[in-house]
Every structure is written in C-alpha cells, then in structure tokens.
Image (tube, rainbow, N blue to C red):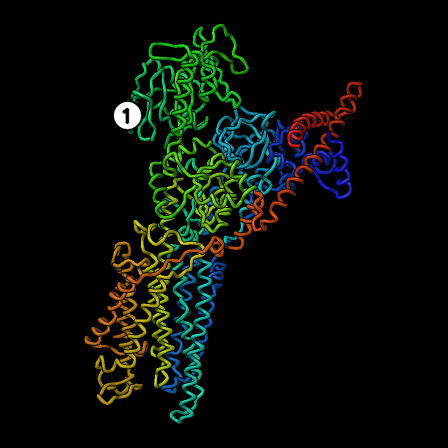
Amino acid sequence: FFEPLFLVVDHMTKSYGVVGDEMQVDVERGGAFGGSPTSSSANLDVLYNMIERKDVASFQRLGGVEGICRSFGSTITSGLGSTQVTTCREKYGVNELPEQETVTFLSLVWEALGDPMMRMLIVAAVVSIIFGMTLEDPHTHEVERSTGWIEGTAILLSVTLVVMITAVNDYKKAKKFEEMAAEQAKKDVEVLRDGIMKSVDIGEIVCGDILFVMTGMTLPADGVYIKGQNLKMDESAVTGESDIMKKCESKDPFLISGTNVVDGDGQVLIINVGVNSFAGKLSMSTRGAPADTPLQVKLGWLADMIGKLGSAAAILTFLILSAKNLFMVFNGTTDFTLTAFLNYILVSVTLVVVAIPEGLPLAVTIALAYSMKSMMHDNCLVRVLAACETMGGTNTICSDKTGTLTTNQMTVVQGWLAGDNFVFSGYGVTGGPNAAVTESGAATVVLHSPQEKIDLMCEALSHNSACEELMQDGKLIWVGGNKTEHGLMGLVKRLGKDYQGIRRQVPGSDKRSYPFSSAKKRMSTVIRVGNKVVLYVKGASEEVLRDCTQALTQSGPCPVDDHYRNGMEEVIHQMANQGNRTIAIAYAELPGMTEFPEEAPSADLTLIAITGIQDPVRPEVPGAIETCRKAGISVKMVTGDNKDTAVAIAKKCNLITGDDYEDGTVMEGADFRRLAYEDPEKLKSLLPRLRVLARSSPTDKLVLVACLMNRGDIVAVTGDGTNDAPALKLSDVGFAMKSGTDVATGAAEMVLMDDNFATVVRAAVWGRTVNDNIRKFLQFQLTVNVAGVLLTVVGSALSAENEEPLKPVQLLWLNLIMDTLAALALATEWPSDDALFKGSGPISRAAPLISNRMWTFVLGHSTFQLIVLLIIMNFGHDIFDVGPCVEGVDTMGEMTEDGQCFGGMVQGTILFNTFIWMQLFNWFNARKLYGEKNPFEGMGRSKLMFIIFCVCALFQWSAVQLLGRFISTVPLGFYHWMCCLLVAVIELPLGLLISCIPVPTWKPKSDDENQKGLDKDKQALITEAMKNAGMFGDVPADQQTQLRSRRRTSAIVNDVMTQQRVLRSINTATQLTENESEGSSSAVRPGRRRRDSSLVAFASKRAEQMVQAL
C-alpha cells in the first residue's frame, strides 16, 4: 500500500534533502549523546524535547534514568562528586537566568531626559538665559543681568522637577521588584552529592544532581523520576490539565520545572537547569522591553502636534512683529535697531515655551504613581506603571475560572446520603425533595440520615484519603491529596468528626491504599478490623454506581436494579447541571481475604453517598461581572472544564443568564481551533458574544487574546500558570496571581495579591480614573496654552507699541504655578463610585486623545478668555479707572485725554491677575469631562485640590502685591482686586453653558480603524500567534485556501516519510530478532535492543494512525 508513495518520497528526500521526523533523526545521531551513540556527553536539546513531549520511548532509548545519569558523570546511589559538580556547572550551566540589565538612577534620569518635550524645554531655557544675560532691553536699553537669567533658570527648574520625580518613582519601583525577585530566589533544597545529603541554594543545582522532592515543593529544574513514595505532581501550571499526575519510571518519569509536588516524596535526576529548562525557556521568551501603552502613543502624537503648532505660532509672531517694526521704520515713527529683532526672537522662544505643556509629563507621572500606591491598598501590585492607565481602556477581560472567579477551595455543597438529600445554602444550588438544608454560617449540619450512616460515610472518607491539616504561617491548611479530597475532608470536619482519630483506630499494617486510577476513575483503600476486611471506594459517580449492587437507605441496604440506577443517575445529573463535580462513596466487605492484593480489588459495592462538590464562586464575582457589563467591558471565562460545568459556573458568575443564549456564547476549545483554522472570519464575528471557552488549552487562550487584540480590543488577561505566560505577555495588561508561578508573575504587568476577579475590576476603575485625571489636566492645560498663545500672537499684532500683552516672566509664572500645581491637583482625584459608567464606555485604542467634548471645553473657555483679555488690554484703562501714569512705575504707559494711563503697569497687572484667576476658577470646570453640570460635585474626592487652590491663590496675591519688578507687577487696591475676581468668576457659569452644548461622540468606523493604535511589536506577536493557529494573519483571503492546502499536503508527505523510516527500523528490528534467535544476540548491546523494541512498539501504533489518516 505504501510502496508507490515511498518511491516518490525517497526521490524527494535524495533530491531536495527533506528532513523528517525529529525523533528518528535523534536516534540516528545517537540519542541524547552528542556525536556517536557511545559518547558520554549529554545533549541538552534532545533531553529538553524529551521532557517537553513526555516521550517515554526516547527515555527508554537513552537507557532510562541510569543511562542519562551516566551521561552527566553521576550515579543514582551517590550523586555527583565535587569535581563533577564543577564540570557540569561549566559545561551545562547554572540554575539561574541571566540577570536583566541593572537599572541605575542615572540611566532613569537619562531616559526621562530623552522625552522630546524635555529636550525642547532645555533648549528654550538655554536660549532664554543667553538672551537675558547678553541682550539690551529694548525699552530701558540696558542689559538686565540681575533679572535676565530668571526665565531660563525657572524653565530648567521645571524640567529638573519633572525628570527627578519620574526617575525617583521608576527607581524605587525597580528596586522594589529587584528585592522581591532576590527574596523569591533564596530557597534551599536537598541534593545528594558524594553520597551525602546536602542543602544547597536552588541556584547551585546542576545537571546530574540527585534532588530530593517532597510535598508542597515547586520543581526548580527539569528532571526524571528515580524513585519515590506515591509521588504526585500538579502539572496544571504547565500543561493546563487539572488532573494530578503520578510519577513512575515506566509510564511518566518526567518532572517539569515550575510544577508542584502535591503528594509523596522521592528522588529526581536533574537533566536541564536555568535557561535550558522548560520554565527557563518560557521565562526568557517573555522578556523584553514593554511596548508603549495606548496613552503613551497618543501623548507622543500630541507632543509632536503641539511642537509643530507652537513653532508655527512662534514664527508667525516673529514675522508679525518684524513686519510691523519695518513698517514703522519706513514711516519714520521709530528707529531701526537690531535689539528689537532679537527681542522678537526672545518673545517667539517664550511662546514655544508657553505652547509646550510641560506640566503634562508631570501630570501623567503623578497620576500613575498615585494610582499605583493606592492600588496596593486594593490588593493589586503594579509591576509596570503604565499598565495603570491601560486598564482604563480595557474593554475585554479573559479570566481563568479556578481561583479567580472561584475560591480555589473545593467544598461539598450538596449530596445524597443513604436515601436522603442534603444541601448547604449560600452556594446557589438546590437539593431534591425534602432535602435537609444547612443555613450559611450554621455551626451544626442538618441531616435526615441516621447517625450510623453518617459515621460510615466519615469512616470511608477518613480512611480513603491522603490529606491532612497542618499549621503553616499561623493558619491551618490541607496538605497532600488533591483539592477534591480537601473538600470531602472538610465535610468530615464540618460534621464534627475527628478524621485523625478514625485513622488511628486502624494501624498502618492493617491498611492498604490504592491511589486514584484514571482508568477506573476511583481511589480505593482496604482495611482490616478484627476478622473483617472492608473495601472503601470513592470516585466518579457514574463509574462507581456501575459497580454498585446495593445502596444504603434509612432502613438498610436495598438492591440496585435498573429502575433504582436510573433514579440515582438523575440525582447525579441534577447535581452536575448545577456546576458540581459528583463523587460517589461506597464500600464492600471482602470475606476470606488474608493478604492485601497489589492492585485494587474489585467487588460488588454498596452505595453510601453521592456528594456534589464544587469550587464555589466568590461572592463578590457576580456583582463585579454585572459592573463590567454596565461599563461596556466584556468578560470571557477561559477554563479547562467540560461545557456543562463551565456553563453552570458561568450562570452563577452572572456571565450567562437563562438557558437560551446565542450561538457562539459558549464554545469548546476544539470548535474554537477548528474555526480559527477553517473560517477565521466567522470566528471574528462570534468573538463579541463569546462568554465561555470550555475545554480550552493554553494555546487556545493565546489565540483568543491575539484575535481579540487584532480586532482592536484592549485586552486584560488573568493567569497563574507557567503555560499562561505567553498570553499574559501578549495582552495589553496581564494579571498574575500571587499564588501563581514565578514565570507567570514575570510576564504580567500586575499581580493580584488576593487572586480575586473583583480586584481586576477595581484595577479597571483605577485605570479609568487615571485616564480621566490625565484628560482633566490636559483639557485645562490646553485651555491655558491656547489662550496664552493666541493672546500673545493677536495681542502683539494689535499692540501699537509692538509689545506682548504678558511679559515672559509672567508667562513663566503661569507655567510653573498653574501647570505644575494644577497637575498635582487634577491628577490625584480619588475614583468615584460611577467611574466605569461615565461617558460612552471604555476608551478605544484608536480614539483621539482629546475628545469632542474636550475640544468644546478648550475652544469655548479659551475664546472667552481671549476676548476678555483683549478687551482689558485695549480698554481696561477706562473700564477699571486705572488713573494717571506714575513716574518710575508706568514708564511704558501713555496718558489719555480723560486722564487714564493706557498701557501702564496697573493695566498690565490687572490683565495678568485676571488671566491667572480665570485659570484658578476654571480648575473646577476641568474636573468634569462628560458634560456634568455641577463642577463642585465630588469635591470630597479632591481634597488635595482645595488645598492647592488656596496655595495658588496665596501665591498669586504675593506675586501681585509683593514681588513687584521681579514679576513685572504693581500692587492693586481692593477695587481692582474685586474687578479681577468678578470678571474671572464668570468662568463658572460659562462652564455650565458649555456643558449644555450637544457634542457627537467619537465612534470607530471599522475594526481596521481600531487597529491603528496598536503597537508594532504587539502586532508582530499577534500575527505570529494567528499564523501558528492557521489563521495566517494578514495573508489575503484568496491565498489562505491555497496555504491551508499546502500545509495539509506537507503534513501528509512528512507522515509518509516518517512511516518509511519507521518501517525500515522495523526491518532492522526484525533482522535483529532473527539474529538473536540464531544465537548471535551477544553481538547486540542491551541498549540497542531496548531502542529497537521501543521502535517496533512505536511503529505499530504509528502505522495504525497513518492508515486511518490516509
């Protein structure tokens, strides 16, 4: 059947050098040993592939644990010697990951100085100092060296303030995480060296070490099983499978770094450490510089835009003033002087300084740092500061079930015991008819069953379990066994029974336990009490019920016929439909048994009880998910549970309501993968309504995140396992669990200290608040800048004396006082209760940084301010009755016919004072972004703002009344002060009028528009993940069918090539067998025999698969 294909493939192999199956190539190269098969140097790549694939055949070909041990120069009985330890460390590396580049304070300062805004400010400051110290004042015709340095120096002080705050915050954060990482790395383990057990740091472990493992330990490196006592591993952190894996040399000898020992102890041969280990490779793959957040991208665009507009305004101002001066020179009204043109350059540079919102970086830094510290109180540790604001735009959360939506504590919530139903309230489950109900928090459990039946159930559970409660860190926790056993033993404790006392009644010599068998789906224990031998069984309800011939009732055992069995199956079905895992408990007496058998005995069982056990939904989760729904945030549960259980949990979480939900709301991993490969467009259309992805793998989770981000969503992901690291790294915001692995924590931006989904929602509240606070400052800052720039340009153009309305030092005062302190005031407001419900929902990735409502605010208030200030500049001397010019003070003023001083210091001070107070009152308007009418609402959340308002008011009074020449002002009287305040306070009713203007809300025109704001590095990762899933990213639709066809053809050809090599190996094995039968077996090494034997087994299985596939 294969002959024709083999001829074609053989020709292809010779002609094109096609490389086939890696496993067979490894065998041809000599297995795990580099070079020839007799080499004694271990090949770490081959060993890694063996661990990753859990390839028992490869393990056996390499000579088992003894063969691998010899390749490292180690022995099972004594471990490595001192010399071999040094050799292995030099040859195979250490059990540490390379340190990331150490963060220094100076490097962070330099990084902060790399901001384009900072650079522009520094240049402007230097130019200002040079001009101020070298050029003559065009009015006094003197070089004002005593005050000429003030403007530039003040700008440099502002830059220094922003840079130092940024650097100090980043440095403290970096050092804090370095301390945490160093503390986590300090763990001692026991190894066998020179035949002696020694305690070493996990970083000192080397390949070839014999490591002692015990319950509760996390594997620090990859290894293979040597020997142990009932060694069981929780590999869910790596594989995503929740089943506990028992380790043995014949079936599953592989221990993967990052997994946890849940029961037993043993010895393990270390075969890969550090960057060569499974966890090490994953950790290294998730390293890299964090991508820019959506807000950082938009702020970069804003900085460029403001820089260009400010430069254009500065050039325009220079051209206007120069043209007016030349016109006046030609008319003979003034003399030509170079100093005047140099002063126009100074005005233009000052205008650029005014245009650049230097308070914006400070506002962003303050908002992020303030939220980071505050979020610590909400049990959320922020690893990446910028993630605070990213959460504000999050519109999709992909959440794990176990431990995040649920408590991660398996609990018996209902059951059937000897014919009677019982239920515990508070878990959203209902019992059968006449069920005994135990109220939440009740000290005594209510049961209708006779006491002897209750005692029998407790005895069965106590003897037939391997867990116990121990005191750790001041609290009792269950150790050993799995979480299902913990829940069942919790029921025994709640019934007031002493499980330890029950166990002590039977000595260890009269008891034999048989671990959980995935084939029989049960755990069994046989005990001998006097002359009676009893078998206790617990396991999957359907499987145990199948072996039951009797069931307990209140009056005694009754036969289990088909009718009774159907009734019990209905009980099991009702429990399962409520999100429960059902566990049956049964027993049987074994008369005539004198010795305990090696395998669990089979017998006709008597059913004692059926328990409904579940990982209860956290009580705050349904409310949190409802909050997300109202806020426009889609929550998707990603779980490995079966579809029915996942749906039941989703209903309790409020993710799904009712039984009639849309197509695509619930999907299984297999269907998800099929759609991703065969019909990506349909999958894309189903994603918005997807709520539950059941029976999913870590790869499914990664592809789901990639698909969501590719359509423009801002995605947050929760994860606790090593296998979650790629999805955490890819997402916009990754949330690792405090109880999760180090690899997951390293890939995440935030750590949930309480492993609670409600904390994720609280982080979203803080993120939305951070976004809002930054935008509040931004709309206020732009109003000041637009009004200041327009006043300078228009006022200079209208000035008869070619004078700017506000002096450079006054503009600088505005920048330093209003910008810096306004940033502190507006960027530190506490979240409101309705923070998630304001506006039109989460801020899209492609949404403009400045919304239409914000533009209305900026243009409305700046226009009003410009009109008022121009009126004051041209008519203020008459309106405010400034009086005659004062010699020595109003040297620039001119007396009008009615005796008022036009253009004098008093009029200039009124203009400056009014402008500043307009900004102070506009602070309150800027607190509202979404058209709210009351600017004073929620002032309790802005206590710091009230304090800063008072401070700024005091500063302004001091500037006007006390600083005099330094700030180019003169003291004002009570009348003029009242005039300034009354004009400025108009800002408050004006804010109400502007908030009433109807403004359209921005909406993306398509998904493609949403993708515009996506970082390029993220887009590359998304495309790679989608291509790996067969979706081909941005490949044109007309080419995708052809590509899939090529992939299927290539897979078939590769399979045929593999089959060809396997059959050749069978021929070799057959020949060896014939030689052995002829007495020539002495020429064949035992290792070769083992390899050939395993190849025959592998080939037989592979042949069946190939025939089926072809």
Pick the residue in front: 105 or 7.
Answer: 7
Pick the residue in front: 37 or 443.
Answer: 443
Category of crowding for the residue at label 1, using alpha-carbon neighbours closer than 10 angstroms: few (below 14), some (14–19), many (at least 20): few
Residue 354 falls in image quadrant = bottom left
Residue 881: percent from left, percent from top: 21, 81
Residue at the spot 37% in from the left edge and 51% down from the top edge? 841
Relative to 812, does residue 401 appear above or below in the rendering? Answer: above
Relative to 962, does residue 630 appear above or below in the rendering? Answer: above
Relative to 308, does residue 245 appear above or below in the rendering? Answer: above
Q: Return the residue at label 1.
A: 443
Relative to 375, does residue 168 appear above or below in the rendering? Answer: below
Residue 977: percent from left, percent from top: 22, 74
Q: Amino acid at mark 1?
A: Ala
Could you say whether the residue bearing mark 1 is in a helix, strand or loop? loop
- The single residue placed furthest to the bottom in the displayed view is 332
Image quarter hosting the N terminus? top right
